[in-house]
Image (spheres, grey):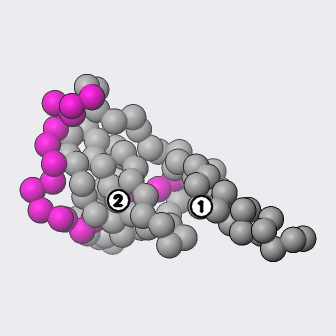
Amino acid sequence: MHIDHVSDYHVGMEDRLLPAPLNSVRPPPGKDRKDGHPAAYMHLVVARLVWPRSVQIVPGMLKWVSSDRVLVEWGSAGRLRQTWLPACDVRRALTYR
């Protein structure tokens, strides 16, 4: 393999779309996000992400709050990602009972 091909492949990998968790939801209706408000503070949260073969609990940052969904920023493979999740899948703390 020629070195130019390797660097081209690497650039292409950074730009590719990553799969969304199965429990992700659409953003609230309206382009200007009239339904909801930005998070007042940078709240640290834990988010439940459902994948085809597993469930993952990740730390994240609350970015937007709507009536039934929230926008969470979380990290994966060294990249920050933002995902809309149902409010029931995001908590301020992980509690065992």
Vertical order, 55 against 34 (above or below): below
Question: Which of the labelled discs sits on residue 73, or is there none?
Answer: 2
Where residue 75 sits, quadrant-wise, is: bottom left
Residue drawn 15% across the image and 54% down it: 39
Q: Amino acid at mark 2?
A: Glu
What is the magenta range?
Answer: 31-50
Work out which residue is located at the far top of the displayed protein and give it.
30
**Mark 2 neighbour density, 10 Å: few (under 14) some (14–19) many (20 or more):** some
Residue drawn 21% across the image and 33% down it: 33
- For label 1, the residue is 14
**Mark 1 neighbour density, 10 Å: few (under 14) some (14–19) many (20 or more):** few
Q: For this view, does 25 lie left or right of residue 34?
A: right
Vertical order, 68 against 9 (above or below): above
What whole-number distance in Å separates the C-alpha atoms at marks 2 and 1?
Answer: 18 Å
Q: Nearer the viewer, residue 20 or 49?
A: 20
Q: Secondary structure at mark 2?
A: strand
Q: Secondary structure at mark 1?
A: helix
Residue 88, percent from left and from top: 31, 48
Could you tell me if the residues under marks 2 and 1 are in contact, i.e. CB atoms within 8 Å? no
User: In the picture, which quadrant includes the C terminus?
Assistant: bottom left
- Say if residue 67 shows up in the picture: no
Q: Amino acid at mark 1?
A: Glu
Where residue 35 sits, quadrant-wise, is: top left
Work out which residue is located at the far left of the displayed protein and give it.
40
Mark sitting earlier along the chain (2/1): 1
Residue drawn 32% across the image and 55% down it: 72
Residue 87, percent from left and from top: 28, 46
Q: Nearer the viewer, residue 68 or 19?
A: 19
User: In the picture, which quadrant includes the N terminus?
Assistant: bottom right
